[in-house]
Structures are given as C-alpha cells and as structure tokens.
Image (tube, rainbow, N blue to C red):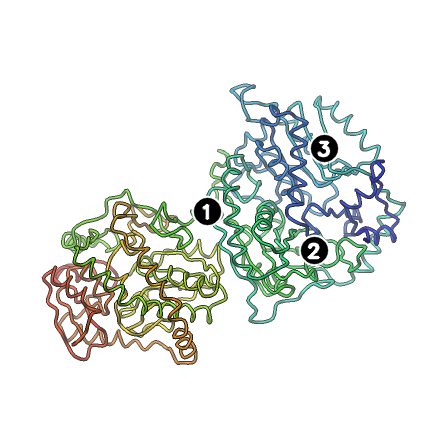
Amino acid sequence: MVWSGSWVAERLGVELVGDGRPDGDGELKDLLGLALRRNPKRAHLLVSNVLGKHVPQKPSVVYGTGFELGRRVRELLGDAEARRAVVLGYAETATGLGHAVADGLGVAPYLHSTRRPVEGVARAGGFEESHSHATSHLLLPEDPSLLAGDRGPGGPDGVDTDAPLVLVDDEFSTGNTVLNTIRALHERYPRSRYVIVALVDMRSPADRGRLAGFAAEIGARVDLVARGAGTVTLPEGVLAKGQALVAAHEPEPAGATAHGAAGPAAPGLRPCTRVDLRWPAGVPDGGRHGFTPAHRAVLEPALPAMAARIAGALGDARRVLVLGFEELMYAPLRLGTALEDHTDAEVRYSTTTRSPVLAVDDPGYAIRTRLVFPAHDNPADGPGDRYAYNVAGAGFDAVVLAVDSAADTPELHAPDGLLAQLAAHTDHVLLAVVPSYVPSRPHPHAPERQEPPVLPEPLRGPAFSSYAPDEVGWLLQDLSDTELEAPTEEREEAIQSGGAHYAESLPVEYQPSAAYQELFKAALELSAARVARAVGTVTETVLAERGPRPVLVSLARAGTPVGVLMRRWARHRHGIDLPHYAVSIVRGRGIDANALRWLAAHHDPADVVFVDGWTGKGAITRELSAALDGFDGFDPEIAVLADPGGCVRTYGTREDFLIPSACLNSTVSGLISRTVLRADLVGPEDFHGAKFYRELADTDVSGHFLDTVAAHFDEVVDTVDAEVKELLAADRAPTWEGWAAVERISEEYGIHDVNLVKPGVGETTRVLLRRVPWKILAGRGAGADLDHIRLLAEQRGVQVEEVDGLPYSCVGLIHPKYTRGATGADGKAVESK
C-alpha cells in the first residue's frame, strides 16, 4: 500500500515520526496522510483517515474511534467525575468527533463551537484559531449555565462550578487553540480539571513542556487523551516550498473546479431525491446550542427508522457515500452508522468543508479530487467557495447529502451548486434535511430573535388518526379537546346571521344507521376493483410525469384516503415509499401557508404533488391555484381519483362513480374531522386544526376500506398499464364542462349561485351528511352507485328527482334558505334577501 503522505514527503522533506514504539511510525501513517493548502501560516495539512472530513471512511470506524476515546476519558475521570463533565468540541472538523466522545462518556452534555452566528442567541464565549483559514469560534449554548458547570450541587446556589471540562479537537499540534480556549473559559468559569482529547498528539518536545507549565499557571489539572502520537519534522523553508508547489499545481482562478470536479449539471437534470427523515421533534441537529443525554435518549431509538427510509430510497445502490455539511457532522455520521446496520451496501462517510486544499490525483497524496461549489447557508462572512474532497471519481453510485434546513437554500439547488456537482459524479443523489434547531431559551438580555420559529413535525397515528404512522403525516394541530360541533341547521343559521366562516366550526359527526353501514359494505365490495384501477392509473401517471419519487400532499380530508392508496400502490408495484402528508385548504382563505413552509423546508417544492379525492365543479382546483401564487416552486395541479368535472389533467378516471370513502365522514378517513381555521385557535405560526375522534374507534372502517381496495391491485395491473399508456399520449387538458353544467343547473332551478350546486356522487354525499339539502338530481336510470344517496335522502326527507342529460350521476342542491351565505364564494355569510 502506498502511504497517502508520500507525495508531499518526497517533495518537501516532511516526515511523520511515531512515538517511539516499535510500530509507532506505521500506526501514525495509518491514521494520517498529507496534503497541501493555500495558507500563509502552514502549508501542509495532516489529513485524518478516521475523522470523516476529507477522506470517506466507514461511519462505524469514524464513530467508533470517537466513542472509544470517550470511554478512555470516562476511565480516566472515574464514573463520579464523568457524570459531572461537560464536553466541548471544535468547529468545524471536530464537531462530530466531540459528539462521539460525549457519547462514549455516556452521561455528558455536549457543546461545540460554531462559526455560524444565530440571531437572538447570546455568546457565552469565543476564541481564535491561530493557524486556521477561518479563525473566529463562537460558543452559543442554549443554557448559559452549561459552561459554568451547572451539573449538580456543590457550589453557591447549587451550581457545581468545578465540573470537569473535556475539550475535543482532531489534532493537538502546537496546542495553541486548546490552550487559548482553556485560558478564556478559565477566566469566566474557573475549574480544577480539564481533559484534552485528540485523534493525534503531534506536539514537538518544546510544546509538550508548555502544557505542564500552563496547567501550573492556572492552578488546574490538564490531562491529554489521544488515539496516536508522534511529531512532524519540517525542513527549513518548507512554507515557501509548499506555497510554490501549490501554485505550480493549482494555476486556475479561485472558484474554478479542479481535478475531476464537475461543472454545472446538464439542463433538465434532476439533481436529487428528497428523503423524509422524520427527524424526532425537539432533538437538536447537533451540538451548536448543546446536546444533552435526554436528547440522546430520543435520537438513538429513532435512528433505525430513519436509516430504513434512506435505504428504501437507495434502490439497488451498492456503494454509498453519506456526505455531511461543514459543522453538521454528527447527524449524518449517526445516519451512516445506522445505514450500515440496515443495508448490505458498502457505506462511507465524509463531509464538506470551508478549507481550501490542493487536490492531486496520485495514490501517494491524501486529497485525490475535489468539488468546488458556492456556500449555501448564507454565511455571516459572505459568499465564498466550499469543497468536497475525494468524492469525484470515487465510484459511489449513490450519495446521501445531509444538510440542516438553514442550508437547504436556492444556492444548494443552483446549476453550479453542490447537488448539481454531485449529480455529475454519481447516478443517484439523495437529500436528507435535518431541521435546524432554534433555542427556545435565549439569554434574557439577548435581542429578539428574527428568524421564524421551527414548525412542529407532522402528527401521525396512532396518537393522531387511526392510520399507521408511515401512511400519512398530518400537517395539522390537534384540536381534539376543543368543542367545535353544532347541529347542522343551528350551525348554518349562526354562520348566516353572524358572518362567520364555515371553517370555524364543525358539523356533528354523522353516525350511520345499521342499514347504511350494510350499504357501505356492499358498495365497497361492488366498487373496490374500480377504485383500485383508478388508484393505479393516477399513481402511474404521477410517477411517469412527476417521478421518480414525488411527495404526495393530500388535501385533508377527502384526499387523504386517496393519498394513502396511491402510496400503497407505489410500494406494492414498484417497492418505493413515497412521502405522504395531509394539509388543510379552506375555500376563501386558501391553503395552510405554514404547512407549505414546512414542506418547502423538508422537500423540493417541485416534487410536491397535491392529491384530492374527486372534482365537482373545480372550486378547490381554482382555490389551490390562487393560493399558491405567493409560493415559489409548487405546481398547483391536483391529481385526483375521479375527475367528472373535467377540471384537471391528472386523474384515475373521468367517470362519476361511487368512491366508498365519500359515503362516510371521519370513520373512513382515519377518524379525523374536517379541518378548522379559527383565529382564537390557529395563530399566525400554527398549522390549521382538526379533531381526532378516538371515541369512534369501534365504528372505524378506514383500514378496512384501504385493505379491500388494495387487495385488487394485482388483478388490475394490466388494465392500468394500458390506460396509462393511452392517457400519456392523449390530450388531457381540462374541459371545465362540469362548471358549465353547474351554471346551467343554477339558473334552470332558480338558485343563481353556483356555490349551492354540488355535482357528483362525492359532493352530493357531503350535502346529505353535512349541509341542509333542498333536493337531489339523479341521472335517469342511475344504478347501485346511488343506493346510499337514496337512503340518506329518505332519512332526511329530501326529494330525489330523476332527470335526463345530466353530465354527472347526481347533483346535490343546498337549501338556499339556510346556506346561501354560508357557502358564498368567499366562504362567508351575508344577510338573507
């Protein structure tokens, strides 16, 4: 094997000398290679093979190295002192290493320095790094007492001011950075014990003596724990020689790509597939503001499921790189270790960096290739180049890029951005976004925080809805404990007289009679195959036109069972798990803007496909299009199971037939109510609300409906394939014939308000379940699709009038006396005329 430092050693005379043990030199060279960089203070760079920064390495090796160092610190301190310790890591290279050391201690909170100022978070300290290209380190703990040693009783007011501080860096060379840190912190938070941890101790004999003198100076014990030890021998004039060597091998202007790096991606290239990690709520993305044992206890059991989601999106990739982002090293590292346990693929891990290093494609040089791309996290020091080393040409057939949401910016997705650069060197790029943690307890004297608060994670069953947690994430808030229901007539009279919006209350949940329940079961058996066929057709159309892994976003609640079925089809037919969320849209008030903000922070808006059950006259289609005007990147087109109104171009069928999920309310929709938007319940930073009717579990048929339809998937595959082939070649432009028919009916029956005309089986069912119906128009000779309509009409004493020439199977007319205002174009009531 060629040592990855031999190229530099041969040209500059630099030598690595071990610690004097028989195999000390060999062990040191296993840990380190050498490279060159543009730096006025130090030309050479020690490149670690186990840090996971510049050299892709097995995640288990990177994490295991830090974890084992943490175990050694625990043995050094003893269990009692370890329980009181605080661990501090250095940005950017040692943020993940320090976190792994803290895990090895097992009971220690962790904080790392940062070069990213956070608005509204006060500095608890800072220091300079003398030899670095980027010097200023900030300390921004959420809890300012963390560095003060608030780890138990012992000092004034119960504060333990003498808790050991463990400082972790990747290398201990001159020791200046660590000693500067200790000196600065010791002035503010004096303590009697410090432990320095590093992968390698590379101090000269003179520097080794400085540490003992420094400890005596501050009156504290300072220990050192390192994986390896040795020295770097530098000949006279090495800095100038190194700079000349860099200039000779890197003549291109700053910002250009070099040595196998890619230019902008080809036009039309889809640079990434988003993976919905479902990062556990409340767990920080790293140690920038502190990471406690309580956070660790939540993260650990969540890692396997997150790895499974990544593995499911990787397909048949056999060599995978998990690529972290600058200071965000720990989260992608742990995703990588979990992925190693979840797949047979070869997994490697490294991260991007601010550090400019020369790339030389030689086996004896540690940095073989580099990618250069613009910074994408709006850094405080302005725009600049960033780097990813040893990725290009490394043979990865998939790269999982993990960033925090603050770095998921247009610059990341730009033609010259990191995603496009990666796409030029691998077949498959996955993007996993970890929510950026915003401290909830800023310093009392800190200025008011300007950045928007982090939105909560989606609600999932069984805590909210009877659906399985992977079937749908509800971007809603739970209003289950709020009284919102009123009898239909009373509710609509109140709306009409008070000018209230229809979405501010809920109708009393309809409880079907025994006869109606039997009718539902019969209707489901009759139509399940037809529904399965429509599900397959709309899903295959979406995959063909919006693939390979669209993000399904159903319009709650009628669209949600359809979204779940589309997700099941994609998994059954293609083995892919599509992300699926449910959001609220309210006529006259638009879609939930906070839900869109959450989606944009976690997925590419271009991948979002809105899903609904059916179209009537197309009011929601128009509402969605108008609502998305202020949101970049989202496609307003809706994919529906049935489009009898001719309002959309992505559909399963344009026939008006019975979709059994329209027959009931919450008991076929995961026990979730219609959505609610009321100012005293939904604030400007809240999701819209809904209720979970847990008390109706005994009558819940949501799972039965899904399973019955899915059981027909295999038998309709051939028909679906034929229909999709035909549809993809056809002109599917919306005709809006449904809207024209509604206008005609409105005038013919003297209603003069299209909002009181509800066309189609689904909308007519809603009229009978939730409104005050006037009469039902049924196509002459309509058969079993309308059996439930006839039964509901009979129960409510409503006339069913058979008519000719109806473009729908049926149309429900709402009684103008009660609901003309309540169902106006803006959703608000007006005085009766």
- How busy is the neighbourhood of tag 2: few (under 14 within 10 Å), some, or many (20 plus)? many
- Which structural element holds mark 2? strand
- How busy is the neighbourhood of tag 1: few (under 14 within 10 Å), some, or many (20 plus)? some
Asked which quadrant contains residue 81, the reply is top right
- Which structural element holds mark 3? strand
In the depicted view, which residue is nearer to us: 247 or 639?
639
The residue pinned by badge 2 equals: 389
C-beta proximity under 8 Å, tags 2 and 1: no
Judge whether residue 71 can be spotted in this image.
yes
Q: Position of residue 316 (x, y in %)?
A: 57, 62
**Residue most extreme to the right:** 236
Asked which quadrant contains residue 631, the reply is bottom left
The residue pinned by badge 1 equals: 454
Three-letter amino acid code at the position of disc 1: Val
The residue pinned by badge 3 equals: 225
Residue at the spot 46% in from the left edge and 63% down from the top edge: 550
C-beta proximity under 8 Å, tags 3 and 2: no
